[in-house]
Structures are given as C-alpha cells and as structure tokens.
Amino acid sequence: MSIEIVEVTSRRELKEFIHVPEKLHREHKGWAMPLYSEEWKFFSHGKNKNFDHSDTVMFLARKDGKVVGRCMGIINRRFLEISGEKTARFGYLESTEDMEVTKALVTHVEKWAKSRNMNKIVGPMGFTDQDPEGFLIEGFGNEPTLATYYNYEFIPEHIEKLGYGKEVDYVVYKIPVTSEYPPIYKKVLERLSRKNEFKLVEFSSTSQIKPYIVPVLSLVNDVFSHLYGYVPLAEEEMEDLAKQYLPALNPKFLKIVEKDSKLVGFILGIPNMDEGFRKARGRLLPFGFYHILSASKKSRQLDLLLGGIDREYRDRGVDVLLGSSLMKSAHDSGIKFIDSHLELESNMLVQAEMKRFGGQIYKKYRIFQKKL
C-alpha cells in the first residue's frame, strides 16, 4: 500500500505524533524514552510559547494502517527577523528504514515551506538552540544525552539521498575526569588567587540557584547571539526552561563567576540519567521519579548543558576558574568522564580547552540544508 501523510490537527493525532519514537526505537539499544508530560507541553500550542512566534506543521506517515513516521516543519519568525533569511527548519523526524517513508515526510515539509515563500530548509532543528539539533553521523553506540538526537544510522543516509548537503557540523568531546590540572591551569589559578579579582559561586541547594536563572540565561543570549541558528530567549521562555531543567539539576554541578557582584561566567552540567529514563518508560509516576533520581546519583557520566563567559572578561582566567571547579566536583562525586555536548566544529577556542584536559572527539552531529 502507498504511504499516507496526515497533518496533525487533533489531540488523538498529536498523541500518535508524540508516541512515534517509542514505536520505532523499541529495539534500538541505548535509546532513552522522554517524559511524556514534557513532550505534551513541548508540542502543544498554549503550553510552549515558541508557537507564538513560529509557523509550524506536524505530519504523520501511515502505511498499512500503522503509523511509521513523523516530521515537523518550523519557521521561527523571530529568527527570520534577526537573520534576514527565508529559511525553514525540519525537526523531530522519525522514520522506518523504508526510504519512501522519509521521502514522503520530508517532501511534505518542503512543500509547506515553499508555500510560505521560504527558499531554504535546514535540519534537524527545533524552535531554539536549546532544542535537539543535528543528526548523529559518527559515534553510534555511545550513551546519548537528553538534549541531543539518538537517531538510527540510516536517517542521515536518507536525508543525503533526498538532495541535502552539510550545513554545519558539531563535535562532542569525551573528557576524562582527573584530579590533576593542566600546567597552564595551575599557573592561571595561582595568579587569580593572588589578584582576588573574581568570585567563584557554588551551590548546595536548588533554592540557591533560582535568583541566578534569569542572569545566567541573559548571559546566554549575549554570548550565543553570534552562533549558528541562535534565537534569543524572552524572559518568559527563560522561566519555562528553568522549570524544565531545575528539578534535574544537581547544584554542585553549576558554577558561577562574579566580578563586583556581576555575573561574568558560568558552566552547567547534569549527571547522565538515561538509565533512569529507560526504567521510567516515559512516566514520573508511580516509580519513574525514583528511577531517574537513582540514575542521577549512580551516573559516572556528566553531560555539559550550557556555559558562557561575558565577552569583556574572556582571556582573563574565568574559563580556568569554572573548568577546574567543575572538574573537582565531578572527581569528588565519582564521575569518570564528561560529555562536552555539541561544539561547533569551527569553535577552536572551546575545543582547545577540551583538549587540554585530554578530551577527544567521540561523536559528531550534522545539520543538513537544501535549497528550495
């Protein structure tokens, strides 16, 4: 039978859309199921404020009466205003190994984008930089992180066959946790200690973190503004992001540096909780929360989420203060290695810091593009 593409317009179809990954990744070793309560918030108008400034479409693919794939099209109007581009995004693509399923889904998103006068499409991307972006193209079989795609190897192959090429690549470093710092770090730390110019702020409870949420994410807006595809966060979006991640944060893995009570840098990591999410099977109740919390405590992998330094204070040792402090907390907690999260392949300054600690690239992600 032919493949039927259906636009998601009802709650029943949205439920099908949200549950597609569970059906297709059931036998995919290493895949971690998301929390369905969070998925409903993310994909629902009225709950996810990104819909307010974006044009979107969601498609389901059916074959022989069964759902076999999904894809979302996004036109972030705020990004278009900032960039001056006419670029649409595709994201949340899931498909069987049948090339025709992927083709049907992506073709429908392309037609939708063309109908809105877009001349280019990129993906996978979400609404913002905080959403998963880029398909895994190297490093299959390694533990995924919550903020990235964990796709099958055939998905990027399908995309290339549909005429897509590379837009940008991201690399991920695996950094061994150690009690020994690079020689250059020791010298910088000694100098910082003598000058007493910066204050390192550490935390022991999530309640202590709350006053720093908006300042931290405001700094993210500033330092990330030049990065590929970045869309600044409004304050209400900052609050929503905080609500999403605050319950999962371990306060000792957030480090902040201040100068004269002004926030000038931060770094944030969370213990990898994939095993807990697998056991929770998408639900916090009745035992999902326990499984996730337990996995967080037992994890030996720390996943970096965010980090940034005020442009005015770069090359003054703030990065060393943040990195050494996070490394110490990771070592004291029994963490064995750190996953750097996505770093632009062109960001050689950040990559140099990863290499100083013995980090090596072990995963690579790609955002694809196609002219319409």
Image (cartoon, rainbow, N blue to C red):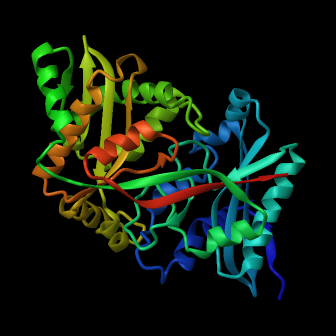
From this viewpoint, is residue 115 visible? Answer: yes
Residue in the picture at 32% in, 47% down: 355
- Judged from this view, the residue extending furthest toward the top is 260
Closer to the camera in the image, 343 or 236: 343
From this viewpoint, is residue 205 visible? Answer: no
Q: Quadrant of residue 302?
A: bottom left
Residue 29 on image: x %, y %: 42, 79
Q: Quadrant of residue 49?
A: top right
Residue 144 on image: x %, y %: 41, 64
Q: Quadrant of the N terminus?
A: bottom right
- State left or right for residue 3 relative to residue 242: right
Residue in the picture at 67% in, 78% down: 68
Closer to the camera in the image, 299 or 368: 368
Seen in the picture, residue 314 relative to 253 is either above or below; the reply is above
Seen in the picture, residue 85 relative to 153 is either above or below; the reply is above
Q: Quadrant of residue 273?
A: bottom left
Closer to the camera in the image, 115 or 328: 328
> How many numbered callouts?
0
Residue in the picture at 14% in, 15% down: 196
Seen in the picture, residue 61 relative to 368 is either above or below; the reply is below
Residue 42 on image: x %, y %: 55, 51
